[in-house]
Image (spheres, rainbow, N blue to C red):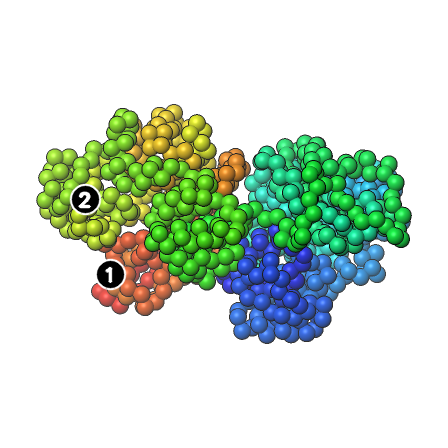
Amino acid sequence: MHSTSRRPILLVGAGERAYSAHSLLQIAAAHPLVLVDRTIPAWARPYLADAVTADPAASDKAATAAAAFAVEHSVTGVVTYLPEYTALAADLANRLGLPGNRPTAVVRTQEPSWARAVVVGDHETDPDGRDVAMEAVVVAPGEVRPVAITRMDIRPEVTAGPVGYSVDARDDLLHNRALHNVISQAITALGLTTGVIHADVRVSPSGPRVRRIHACVAEGLIPLLVARATGISLARTAAALAVGDAPDLSPTHERAAALRFLYPETSGPVARLNPAAPTPAEPWFDRFAWTRQTGSSVRGPADSNVEAPLAHWVVTGADAPVCLQRLDLIAERLGAPPPSAWASRAPTACGAAPPVTCHPARPQMDPANVGDALVPMPKPLILLGAGPRVYSDFTLAQIAASRPVVLVDAFAPDWAHPYLTHHLAADPANSAAAIAAVRSYAAGHQVGGVLTYLPAHRLTAARIAQQLRLPAAPVMALAACADRLAARRLLAQHALPLARWAEACDASAAAAHADALGYPVVIKPRDGAVTMHVRNRGEVPSAYDHVCRAAACPASDSLLVEEDLEGPEVCAEAVVVDSTDIRVLAITRTTAGPPPARQVQRRSVYAHDKLLHHPVLRQVVTRAITALGLTAGVVHITMTCTSRGPRITDVNTHLPDDLIPLLVQRATGIDLPQIAADLATGRPPNLAPTRQRAAAVHFAYPSATGRIEHLKVTSATPQPLVDRFVLTQRPGQDVVSTPYASSWGRLAHCVAVGPDAATCHTTLDRMARHLTVALSTPVTNSRAA
């Protein structure tokens, strides 16, 4: 069954770029996004699939316009991260019969008369208490899950609002039963049954008291802090609940993140800002942003409020105290006093106030316009090729979740639009055209890195990175890996364990080499995924011809004839941080189908795979990467575990296909696409596993050749261990069975997760029985293999 999560959802209100960009990007990375707003801000346009121009402040008109769009375009959910629009979003979801809270329940959170029934006012709270907030998720009526605790740095002598926030994944209050109970009771009393909740609480010796319940994601940059500290995306969680999906609340980080605002010391117009914001190279520094422009009026401490900050900066660390030290360090580089010093600084009187100077770092600069610097996003990543949605959607979404993506492709497919900030119309298969397009773009824009997850474009990507002086593995090393014969020669020179092989220029030579090696053998192209397993001499000519045609080999090209090794096939998912730091992060086990094609039927990843720490296997991987001269990137090394030890059969210098990045992330929490993007942009990658389970995928192939008349998943009890079940063909398409079946002819795939690999395989076996296909010829009914 096709997932409904790719149908569009409505977002009510874009908000300010400085504080809302993170949440909007997170939602757009998972769903086609349709914005409902009075105007469509330029910064949000690259992330939108469509827009409804209607002012949400005029709720009736906005609801009517949005509802008309939703009916015509099969909208599947409504979400907002702006508190002022929560009632409108709830009303719109209710009109359309979509998941969400009852509008009356949301209105209660905003009406003082209702709120006083379940929460307390300032005059009722302990003045000696401290203000915190809980970020929680209502996954079902009465089931509230705490996600994070937000600590606030309150300095009333500086501003009415907080001067900063911090989130620590290990915060003791996160597991405080009294706090959890009082928030759950307030949520239940208000009638909220789903969604992300932000609860303001006063914690004191007399116990926690709820001050306010917000029926939406926290405002500002709190969702960013939660994501950096725990790995949980509040915005994506809200979107998942809005479409009726189960949210992923598994933390993938266990650290802290903190934010500080810079407030003006005096009132008046901003005279100058320093555009050269402090941007240390340390991995803990997340971002800095000016949020005011020269000429704008601001208020000093006597009159300042939460709307008046001049700038903010975000850091991460092992815990909150470390983050606070780092916030102070950035303040020192900026020339701003720490909050502890603000109380002693006398505010300037209002009236004819002097222009504001924002403690600029030396030397002072006077920019003509700092508008584009208000929200400093990471530099764009150039991506060569989008690839097929069915296998590339997850990878592109992970990359786009943390950085702008500029796609270089002949055209940008509709499914990729939500992930892209820009598209360069150039065919990456035409290396010269792609290089010219990127160089032209780079002449007027900053570029952070160049990446591709498609093997056909890896050399072009490396050449572009080299010309732009951006991080990449050496082109010569990648070229050697792209040619199986060249790679084997290099590996053999360094005495790496390989299957025995020979080069064949035609079918006759292939037969002679196969006779010498001994059957069975494998025939492979020098580049490409097509292989044929040959059991005897009579099968060589047809197999040789099939590989040549399927791999589109030039007439002068030779093929590889290799012994067919006995033993399980495994793949090492490795990361080369640099030439001295090579890590094996996961082991992928492969189950192949029958010869001669032996198409991949299953892939599985288990966080506790015994081979993950096997000294011989790890040594083989490290030596192979070193021998090939690879100095950075994600590497996928295929081996056969024989009775004589592991033997290398392939080395791929790109993100693995067949949904392996998804399996690795589901099983270990390690994000291979993010790692590849980090390495391509010169950032230290996060290689720490955060999960200890298993994940597996099953690919269904047709058991006969013909045209699909009928393809569906029969009714089945919902399976909590099924991550996704996706049909990859549709009625009317022609499919081919073995021996000439290919990955493009797969009917469907199913992904399962579980505590171990055996559980995953059991789930996949059960789900495979629910897929049926009817073909027009040569049979009338068939069950998928």
Question: Which image quarter is the N terminus in?
Answer: bottom left
Where does the image place residue 778, in percent across and percent down from the top left? Answer: 22, 65
Q: Quadrant of residue 152?
A: top right
Name which residue lies at 24% across and 53% down: 552
Name which residue lies at 63% across and 34% down: 317
Most foreground residue, 400 or 374: 374
Label 1: how many Cα within 10 Å (few below 14, some 14–19, many 20+): some
Q: Which residue is mark 2?
A: 558
Q: Are marks 2 and 1 in contact (CB under 8 Å)?
A: no
Q: Quadrant of residue 510?
A: top left
How many numbered marks appear? 2
Three-letter code, disc 1? Thr
Q: Which residue is mark 1?
A: 705
Name the secondary structure under disc 2: loop
Name which residue lies at 31% across and 40% down: 479
Name which residue lies at 38% across and 25% down: 615
Three-letter code, disc 2? Ser
In the image, taking residue 303 as reference, residue 697 lies left or right, namely left
